């Protein structure tokens, strides 16, 4: 047999092979049958196990929503849940949007067309900011170096092509050309004369190309220190003579911020080169073109269909999602936290929550033991690491309360003149204004940064907390009637992954209070960086179908995966579990079918490695994997011991 000796296993992990052995490709051995039988849903670029639990949850909640909206069942007394149900009725009214056409956006589109000079823009900066219609945004967030203080953060808007790596000239003209043609068509559908529509779309593309030259790449932004550049208010407002930044801060009530965190200084330094009277046509074109592409989603089916050409070339998607999925996605997008409370209370169950909480505490304990027994940390750094772990806050299931801006939300029914578009726009303004009101206020660390129905989990370095939503407490991640080893392979690795983010290349820069502060000795940090570089090299260039991974871009998530699998294995061993069942379910929770276009998009801009590599490369670094499946040097999953990477 051939000695493959490669990272990522033998063969193409995007092509199912039901005959492959786990010794040659664990991911395919576990998932090929599923890959063969599971098509990508209509309107989506991929399907994963996360999508499957979302589907199950969506079916449960959609039935509930329908019963509440029709009056078949009384709306629960959960605060603001009645607003969510009223909004659901509005989103479900497809026929009304067909009648309305472009009417809902007419006034706002007319307003954008009325901007004829830079002075017009300056007179309306706050309105444009609150409507999300500028090539930058301002947000009130905790300061990196004082996690108890809310300050202003300056961020840039997304590029048309997602990341700077798409502007290398290979397909740039083709992709931007498709977007430009799509945009002109959308504007004509909205009633704008053809020549003007084409001018606006052309101007937008010209500005976008110039933005790409001064934006940081996804790889740059994956290192958290590259996004933290505090600047005095006086210096910030002097950065542009063209745009009235001082007036904008004053009008939005955030001028009293202690300072402004600038995420991308090079972009701000180029403001006057990008935005001036000579280039005003480009800015106006950008404002109008980006607006129509975003807001088309809230209009008739014809408008939504007209956005598919660009989604096809970027995502590989050539159809719309089915109606009930669209309604669910839009309702939960606006009211996710409120709906999450309902879901957690009704569907999680106290027994499952208690058992899951026990698993989490077991994992924390194992992590503590691993830190105590660590052989490359000094006692000084080790003590501080253990202190950080001991103060880790656990958010499991669903929150007791949600953010206060939901109290300020107003949902105007269709019969009272409300539209899908107007309700989204007005409540997004409320959300932004509520965020601005937090300026210089104490940070509320009890607030969850994701809802209980987000099929995900997270670690927040500024809170030093782990959030594990109720939705992932179901198969294949977790079940009371599932083998405990399988639970460790699913939910257990997720727990360990999020804990490990406290000690990845970004999280390790924050102390137990959530402040960016060096708590390492120089020698320990040098050794840590040596291991980080080994993790980067481990994944860099790994092939997944037609793409190659960027080790620098995804290193933080790979450290999370590595720590998660390692700690789950140790916890499982303490419980006497079968390691092969753990590895099998670890592979299962990353099952994926995807379009090639979406693989490229994720590989170029997402800090997560592609699922196939998250399985195979990580298990190749675990000695227990070789023992569980009797993997030998002649097998495709064999990685030489010297090349295996371990950090935590």
Image (cartoon, grey):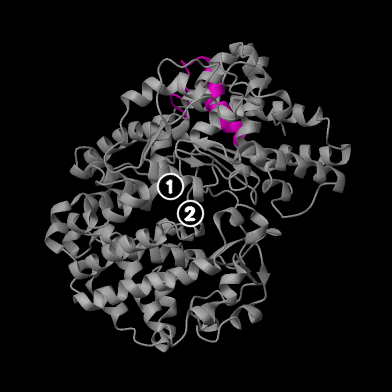
Spatial separation of the CA atoms under disc 1 and disc 2? 8 Å
Instruction: Please report the bounds of the magenta region as a residue range.
Output: 473-497
Quick one: 450 or 162, which is closer to the camera? 162
Which comes before the other along the chain, label 1 or label 2?
Answer: 1
- Quarter of image, res 624: top right
Please state, as top left, top right, bottom left or bottom right, where the N terminus lies in the image. Answer: top right
Asked if residue 125 shows in the view, the reply is yes
The location of residue 462, given as percent across then percent down, is 65, 52
Residue 71 drawn above or below residue 371: below
Residue 609 drawn above or below residue 178: above
The location of residue 45, given as percent across then percent down, is 35, 42
- Quarter of image, res 47: top left
* Residue 618 among those drawn in magenta: no
The location of residue 301, given as percent across then percent down, is 19, 54
Say which residue appears at 17% left-offset and 52% top-offset.
94
Quick one: 34 or 596, which is closer to the camera? 596
Total labels: the figure holds 2
* Residue bearing mark 2: 403
Q: Judging from the image, what secondary structure is the residue with disc 2 in?
A: loop
- Residue 275 lies left or right of residue 145; in this view the side is left
Say which residue appears at 58% left-offset and 17% top-offset.
635
- Check if mark 1's residue and mark 2's residue have beta carbons within 8 Å: yes
- Quarter of image, res 177: bottom left
């Amino acid at each position: 047999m051939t000695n493959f000796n490669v990272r990522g296993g033998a063969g193409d992990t995007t092509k199912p092979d039901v005959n492959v052995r786990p010794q040659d490709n664990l991911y395919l051995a576990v998932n090929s049958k599923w890959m063969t039988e599971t098509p990508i849903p209509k309107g989506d670029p991929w399907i994963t196990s996360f999508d499957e639990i979302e589907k199950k949850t969506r079916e449960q909640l959609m039935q509930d929503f329908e019963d509440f909206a029709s009056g078949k069942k009384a709306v629960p007394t959960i605060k603001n849940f009645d607003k969510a149900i009223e909004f659901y009725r509005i989103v479900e009214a497809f026929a009304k949007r067909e009648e309305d056409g472009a009417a809902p956006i007419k006034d706002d589109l007319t307003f954008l067309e009325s901007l004829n000079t830079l002075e017009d823009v300056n007179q309306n900066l706050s309105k444009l900011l609150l409507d999300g219609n500028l090539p930058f945004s301002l947000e009130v967030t905790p300061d990196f170096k004082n996690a108890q203080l809310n300050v202003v953060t300056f961020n840039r808007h997304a590029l048309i092509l997602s990341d700077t790596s798409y502007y290398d000239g290979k397909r740039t003209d083709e992709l931007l050309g498709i977007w430009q043609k799509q945009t002109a068509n959308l504007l004509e559908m909205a009633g704008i004369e053809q020549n003007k529509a084409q001018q606006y779309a052309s101007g937008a593309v010209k500005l976008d190309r110039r933005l790409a030259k001064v934006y940081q790449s996804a790889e740059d932004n994956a290192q958290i220190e590259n996004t933290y550049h505090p600047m005095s208010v006086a210096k910030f407002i002097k950065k542009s003579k063209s745009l009235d930044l001082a007036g904008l801060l004053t009008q939005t009530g955030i001028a009293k911020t202690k300072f402004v965190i600038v995420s991308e200084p090079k972009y701000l330094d180029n403001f006057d080169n990008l935005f001036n009277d000579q280039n005003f046509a480009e800015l106006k074109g950008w404002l109008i073109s980006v607006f129509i592409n975003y807001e088309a989603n809230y209009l008739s089916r014809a408008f939504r269909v007209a956005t598919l050409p660009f989604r096809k070339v970027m995502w590989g998607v050539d159809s719309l999602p089915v109606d009930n999925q669209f309604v669910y996605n839009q309702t939960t997008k606006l009211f996710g936290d409120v709906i999450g409370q309902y879901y957690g209370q009704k569907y999680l169950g106290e027994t499952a929550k208690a058992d899951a909480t026990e698993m989490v505490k077991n994992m924390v304990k194992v992590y503590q033991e691993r830190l105590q027994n660590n052989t490359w940390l000094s006692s000084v750094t080790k003590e501080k690491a253990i202190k950080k772990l001991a103060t880790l806050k656990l958010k499991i299931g669903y929150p007791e309360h949600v953010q206060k801006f939901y109290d300020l939300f107003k949902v105007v029914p269709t019969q009272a003149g409300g539209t899908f578009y107007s309700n989204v726009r007005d409540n997004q303004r409320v959300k932004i204004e509520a965020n601005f009101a937090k300026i210089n206020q104490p940070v509320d660390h009890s607030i969850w940064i994701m809802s209980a129905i987000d099929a995900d989990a997270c670690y927040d370095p500024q809170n030093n907390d782990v959030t594990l939503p109720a939705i992932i407490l179901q198969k294949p991640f977790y079940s009371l009637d599932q083998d405990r080893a399988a639970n460790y392979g699913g939910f257990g690795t997720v727990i360990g992954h999020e804990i490990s983010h406290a000690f990845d290349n970004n999280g390790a820069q924050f102390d137990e209070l959530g402040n960016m502060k060096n708590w390492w000795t120089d020698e320990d940090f040098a050794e840590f960086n040596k291991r980080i570089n080994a993790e980067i090299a481990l994944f860099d260039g790994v092939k997944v179908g037609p793409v190659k991974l960027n080790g620098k871009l995804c290193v933080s998530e790979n450290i999370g995966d590595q720590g998660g699998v390692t700690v789950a294995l140790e916890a499982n061993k303490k419980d006497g579990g079968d390691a092969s069942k753990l590895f099998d379910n670890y592979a299962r929770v990353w099952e994926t079918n995807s379009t090639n276009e979406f693989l490229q998009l994720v590989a170029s801009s997402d800090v997560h490695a592609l699922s196939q590599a998250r399985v195979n490369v990580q298990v190749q670094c675990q000695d227990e994997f070789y023992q569980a499946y009797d993997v030998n040097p002649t097998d495709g999953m064999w990685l030489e011991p010297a090349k295996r990477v371990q950090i935590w």
